[in-house]
Image (cartoon, rainbow, N blue to C red):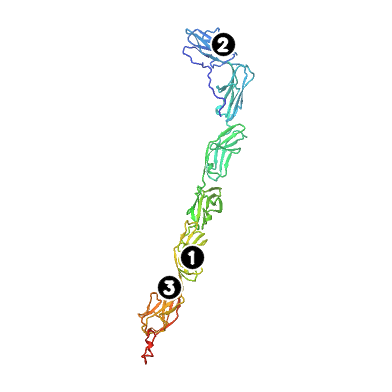
Amino acid sequence: MKKICLLLIFLQSTPRGTTQAHDPVVVVRYPRSGIVKEGEKFTLQCLHSKKYIRWYKDDKYLYGFSNEFYESRAHSRSGGSYQCETWTPTWRKSKSLEVVTIAHDKILTLEVKPRAALRGQSIFLKCLVSHWVGGRSHVFLWYRNEKLITPTDESECTIENAQDSDEASYRCELKIGDRKWVSPEVDVTITELFSRVTLRADPQAKIFEGQQLKLVCSVETSRPNILLQYTFFKNDQPLNFDSYENDYRTELASLSDSGTYLCEANALLIGVKKKSDQVSVSVKQLFSRVTLRAEPQAQIFEGQQLKLVCSVETLRPNTRLQYSFYKNEQPLNFTSYQNYYRTELASLSDSGTYLCEANALDIGVKKKSDQVSVSVKQIPVSKPQLSISPGKELIEGGTAALTCSVSNGSTPITYIFYKDSNQEFHLEKSDRKGIIYQIAKVNKSTKGNYSCAVSNEGAEFGLHSEFVAVAVIVPVAGAFLTSNTNKTEISAGFRLVLRCLVTEGTEPRFHWYLNDRQLENISESYHLNADGSELIINSFEISHGGRYHCVATNRGKEVGIFNTTSNHIDVTVCRVTQPRSQHRWSHCFSSLC
């Protein structure tokens, strides 16, 4: 703090203004100190080579003094402005010399509190006047070790925050006009109130976050019972911590506690303050920044594994961390020393915003990761497969089941059955990977090309199965045998046509029997039409005679054999013998017997 009393260098005997070399100059010849005291003689000398000299005081001619010396005994009115004048060949005056006399009466005393001051303490100086000696303008002069501090019209002076350089002899002077009064000198001593203030970090200035930070402000007082108050500063800013305890502590240090610290000891009752040197405190990370990542990625499908890994690097050996995971800012009730959280089969409800927290339990340091958004999407439905049971060839009157199934896809799944490309005949939404459409009774209209389509929220467009062609098999029935003649005996050489008919049946096959033996190898004498429904004997002979019937069969590739047996027809050749009377057997020569 700046002192109120400032040093001012003042040379009393220096003439004002600039003097040319041939101008006279007045100086104090005696006393050598230049201090003129009342009751003592003083001598002034006019420095000039001319012998014609006149003396003036306050611009008034002094009679009786015409040589280069002016001598007188100082009294209360001796002070003033003195000049000498010389003839050169004109009269030239010297610059004025101000003479101030020091009064012989002791009316001033200097009061100093305290005389034995403490470093940093304020010193109060007061110039006490026993009685006033005039009403003219006055000024107080303050001296330290004979050097003028400052002139002032105040009788008091304060030295704030006293230092070793302020240990000196002090006096005050009262100047009224050309007369002044001088106090006796008073010696002031400066002593140390307390030693240099030091600040130290306990146990050290480099610590890990979560450890205790303790700063101790040490000072040694030179007087007993000195009450000190301590203030701590961080980065030149007060910590708002004023206490009579000399330590500052933070139980759980954080990275923000790093900085430059100092402390200040303050003797409040005396007003003395001292600051320590700065101490740099470094709080290092206990473990690195926490990061959370999703494996294999943050966007997965239903049913896949969801794994969240909390990554952190410990920077202090033997630091054990516990991990907690949060979803949408709510704890998952999952705390473990393992650094991951896993869900084997993710569902749509697992979508959300996750973060993890690493906690050094023994120290109490916690750090959270940034948030990671996890999206669980529905699995797009796969291409469907359409199957027909019992097969692609259905029996009229029977039942059938159409199964549309998918190998993969999130439910619910929408199923649509189609016939002949664009004829939608069934729609169903199901949580199963396949549905069955039942055909209660197969008929001829069941025949056609079938397909199915599927869709879910994971697939933008529906997927279609391959077409399946369904055929309807009508079992053969109602076989009956007809002939191109209604006779059972025919003449030799007759062309016989037997026709096997069915009342119903899909693509029947015909099998011919003679005397209950199948005609497996059709000879040249037997012919079948294209579909085998007609047995043709172009020239009927005796060997062709017998009992005929047919069997109609049909089948599909995936079903059994159906058959139906016709009626029997007996055909023989007429016997022709030599008639005894031609008239009697003439009928045997007709075309038919």
Give the percent coordinates (x, y) of residue 205: 52, 41
Asked if disc 1 and disc 2 are in contact, CB closer than 8 Å, the reply is no
Q: Which residue is mark 1?
A: 403
Quarter of the picture holding the N terminus: top right
Identify which residue, 257 or 220, lies in the foreground.
257
Secondary structure at numbered mark 3: loop
Q: Which residue is mark 3?
A: 507
The three-letter code of the residue at mark 3 reads: Glu
Closer to viewer: mark 2 or mark 3: 3
Q: Which residue is mark 2?
A: 72
Give the percent coordinates (x, y) of residue 29: 53, 13
CA distance separating discs 1 and 2: 147 Å
Q: Is residue 224 above or below residue 63?
A: below
CA distance separating discs 1 and 3: 28 Å
Identify which residue, 250 or 47, lies in the foreground.
250
Give the percent coordinates (x, y) of residue 156: 60, 24
**Is residue 30 among what the camera can see?**
no
The three-letter code of the residue at mark 1 reads: Thr
- Mark 1 / mark 3, whichever is N-terminal: 1
